[in-house]
Image (cartoon, rainbow, N blue to C red):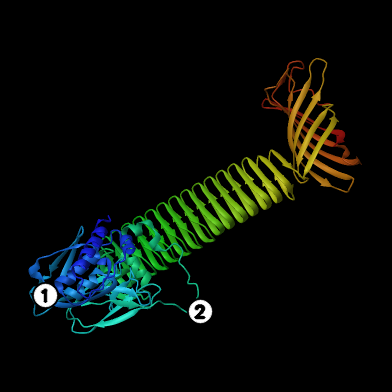
């Protein structure tokens, strides 16, 4: 790769030995040349000075300094014509312009530069329809060439960008009026020049750095995740658009535009800094803004705000605010806020807030606040507050706060909720829940004010003010209200726990051992609250010929009369087993008990009270040749009704409660 550099040194040595009498100053610095690497021939910097030098000798000096060979037809140049060559660390292109003017075109081929005379120079036309402007853009102070500079006319209809070597070329249509050319570069002051549209121009432009006073430098807000950072936009939008966006701060206005692709359209490479009233994109389009309506066969990309309506076959991508309507066959992607309606066949994504409606076949996501409605076939996600409705076929998520309603086929989740959650499977509120949770399987909340209704279980981890209602399990911390379920567990309850079994840590837990007229030993366990507790009971009566025992379940309530006295009302049903192991027939004893409890000392009560007994049996007593049993000491009612023996009597009970 360094062969042309070595060749340049050898040729320069031979040339100086041959032309010692010629007043030529040629500065050649080897190290910078080594740094050039594969720099195109026209962009290689050379230093050479040859006043009043013939064209052929000037070309020889240029090729020697640049380390390459010219290739051209000698009939095309005036070899003996005298020119002035004077370049100092400037591109070969500038030196050639000094020697040959703008009548030639150049082409690199290895270490050769091919010269061709343009046809326009050989055949002058009386009228021109187009002309060309080219040159270099350099820093006014340092002389360094400035790449990626936007060059455009004052109507923003024609534009180009300087290449990596600071060189630009632009073709403009002929006009009888002076044309203003604007040179814009980030961190530089804009430069405006006027050109007369006649022949081609070679214009080298010097630009001045834009350096505000140190005490007035303010940090400019940077847009997070600009639309240009998305992968699809990078794929579709050429880099030249981004260069203009970085350099040009002014947004131009256009009534209408039509494009096939972002680079093929009426706004050309200036589309990123153009706001359109009517925009039609056959396949895909790119615009600075829309204030009206935009149609895209495949894709619409808008860098800043949209005000009006957007329709796309595949998707809409918007970098700023959207006010109006967005519909897409597959997706909508918004970097700013939405006020209006969004509809997509698959997904809607908004990185800011939405005030209005999001509808998607699969999924809606809003990173900011939701104020309105999200409706999706699969899921809705709002990462901040949701003040509205989320309706989804599978899951809804409101990461921070939900106000109003979540309805999902499977699951709802909210950080805090004030309103209603309805789900086919479960509802979860991580923090405060004020309102109602209804689920087919479970509900969960940290602090709940309101109602939990589920098919299987409810959880309130801390404080519940309201009611838990389920078929199976309720779990709560501090319950200010009611639990209704098959199993209920809580730390404390100020209301009632109603179910098959309830256990309250700071509630009612009693063991009672009594005797009555039928069974001599009756242990039982009471658990729940004073207002409502469950009773698990057993009874035993040894007989000479066979033992009799009973298992029972009941409910009760406790009335605290004073510090030492309380009154219990219990209802208990027993199944009495008189056969060797288990009596299969109906053989049931129901008791209604009213017991007075007297505290003997802390934790120990003496209980005494009457009992109403109702005995119901289908069992036939072979020993006594009758329907029913002779367990009652007496009865005030004893009848057989359609194969069922019913007996009633009043008895009593006495014992201890711990």
Which of the two residues, 379 or 603, is positioned nearer the viewer here? 379
What is the x, y in percent for residue 468? 65, 48
What residue did someone put label 2 on? 216
Q: Residue furthest bottom?
A: 177
Residue 564 picture location, percent across and down: 90, 45
In the image, farthest residue toward the right: 600
Dot 1 falls on a residue whose secondary structure is loop
Q: Nearer the viewer, residue 603 or 166?
A: 166
Left or right: 634 as drawn, with respect to 117: right
Q: Quadrant of the N terminus?
A: bottom left
Q: Quadrant of residue 11?
A: bottom left
Residue 39 position (above or below residue 484): below
Residue 302 horizontal/vertical position (percent): 36, 66
Q: Classify residue 553 as left or right of residue 295.
A: right
Of residues 23 and 235, the one nearer the viewer is 23
> Quarter of the image holding residue 38?
bottom left
Disc 1: which residue: 80
Q: Residue at x 61, y 56 (%)?
A: 435
The disc at residue 388 is none
Whichever of callouts 1 and 2 sits on the residue coming sooner in the sequence is 1
With respect to residue 627, does 474 lie above or below? below
Residue at image x 47%, y 72%? 220
User: Which image quarter is the C terminus in?
Assistant: top right
């Amino acid at each position: 790769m360094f062969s042309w550099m070595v060749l340049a040194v050898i040729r320069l040595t031979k040339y100086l030995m041959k032309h010692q009498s010629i007043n030529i100053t040629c500065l050649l610095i080897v190290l910078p040349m080594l740094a050039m690497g594969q720099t195109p021939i026209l962009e290689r910097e050379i230093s050479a000075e040859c006043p009043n030098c013939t064209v052929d000798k000037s070309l020889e000096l240029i090729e020697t300094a640049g380390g390459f060979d010219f290739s051209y037809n000698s009939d095309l140049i005036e070899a003996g014509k005298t020119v002035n060559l004077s370049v100092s660390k400037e591109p070969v292109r500038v030196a050639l312009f000094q020697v040959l003017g703008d009548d030639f075109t150049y082409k690199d081929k290895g270490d050769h530069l091919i010269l061709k005379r343009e046809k326009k120079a050989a055949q002058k036309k009386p009228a021109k329809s187009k002309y060309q402007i080219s040159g270099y853009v350099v820093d006014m102070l340092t002389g360094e060439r400035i790449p990626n500079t936007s060059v455009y006319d004052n109507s923003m209809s024609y534009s180009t960008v300087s290449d990596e070597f600071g060189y630009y070329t632009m073709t403009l249509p002929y006009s009888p009026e002076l044309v203003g050319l604007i040179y814009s570069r980030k961190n530089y002051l804009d430069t405006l020049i006027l050109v007369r549209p006649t022949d081609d121009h070679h214009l080298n432009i010097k630009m001045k750095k834009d350096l505000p006073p140190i005490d007035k430098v303010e940090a400019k807000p940077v847009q997070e995740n600009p639309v240009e950072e998305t992968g699809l936009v990078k794929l579709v939008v050429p880099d030249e658009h981004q260069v203009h966006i970085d350099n040009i701060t002014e947004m131009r206005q256009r009534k209408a535009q039509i494009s096939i692709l972002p680079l093929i359209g009426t706004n050309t490479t200036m589309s990123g800094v153009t706001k359109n009233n009517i925009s039609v994109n056959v396949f895909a389009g790119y615009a600075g803004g829309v204030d009206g309506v935009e149609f895209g066969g495949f894709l619409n990309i808008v860098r800043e705000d949209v005000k009006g309506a957007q329709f796309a076959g595949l998707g809409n991508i918007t970098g700023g605010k959207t006010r109006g309507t967005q519909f897409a066959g597959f997706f909508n992607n918004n970097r700013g806020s939405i006020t209006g309606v969004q509809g997509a066949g698959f997904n809607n994504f908004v990185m800011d807030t939405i005030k209005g409606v999001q509808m998607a076949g699969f999924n809606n996501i809003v990173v900011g606040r939701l104020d309105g409605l999200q409706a999706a076939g699969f899921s809705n996600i709002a990462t901040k507050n949701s003040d509205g409705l989320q309706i989804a076929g599978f899951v809804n998520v409101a990461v921070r706060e939900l106000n109003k309603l979540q309805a999902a086929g499977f699951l709802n989740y909210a950080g805090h909720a004030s309103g209603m959650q309805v789900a086919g499977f479960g509802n979860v509120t991580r923090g405060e829940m004020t309102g109602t949770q209804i689920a087919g399987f479970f509900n969960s909340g940290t602090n709940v004010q309101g109602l939990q209704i589920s098919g299987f279980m409810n959880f309130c981890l801390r404080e519940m003010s309201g009611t838990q209602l389920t078929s199976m399990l309720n779990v709560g911390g501090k319950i200010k209200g009611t639990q209704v379920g098959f199993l209920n567990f809580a730390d404390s309850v100020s209301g009632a726990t109603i179910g098959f079994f309830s256990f309250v840590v700071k509630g009612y837990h009693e063991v009672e051992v009594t005797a009555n007229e039928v069974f001599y030993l009756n242990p039982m366990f009471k658990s729940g609250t004073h207002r409502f507790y469950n009773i698990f009971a057993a009874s035993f009566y040894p007989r000479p010929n066979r033992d009799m025992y009973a298992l029972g379940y009941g409910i009760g309530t406790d009335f605290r009369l004073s510090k030492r006295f309380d009154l219990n009302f219990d209802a208990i049903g027993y199944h009495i087993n008189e056969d060797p192991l288990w009596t299969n027939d109906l053989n049931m004893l129901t008791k209604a008990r009213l017991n007075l409890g007297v505290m003997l000392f802390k934790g120990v009560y003496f209980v005494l009270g009457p009992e109403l007994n109702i005995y119901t049996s289908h069992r036939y007593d072979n020993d006594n040749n009758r329907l029913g049993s002779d367990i009652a000491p007496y009865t005030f009612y004893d009848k057989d009704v359609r194969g069922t023996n019913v007996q009633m009597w009043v008895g009593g009970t006495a014992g201890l409660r711990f």
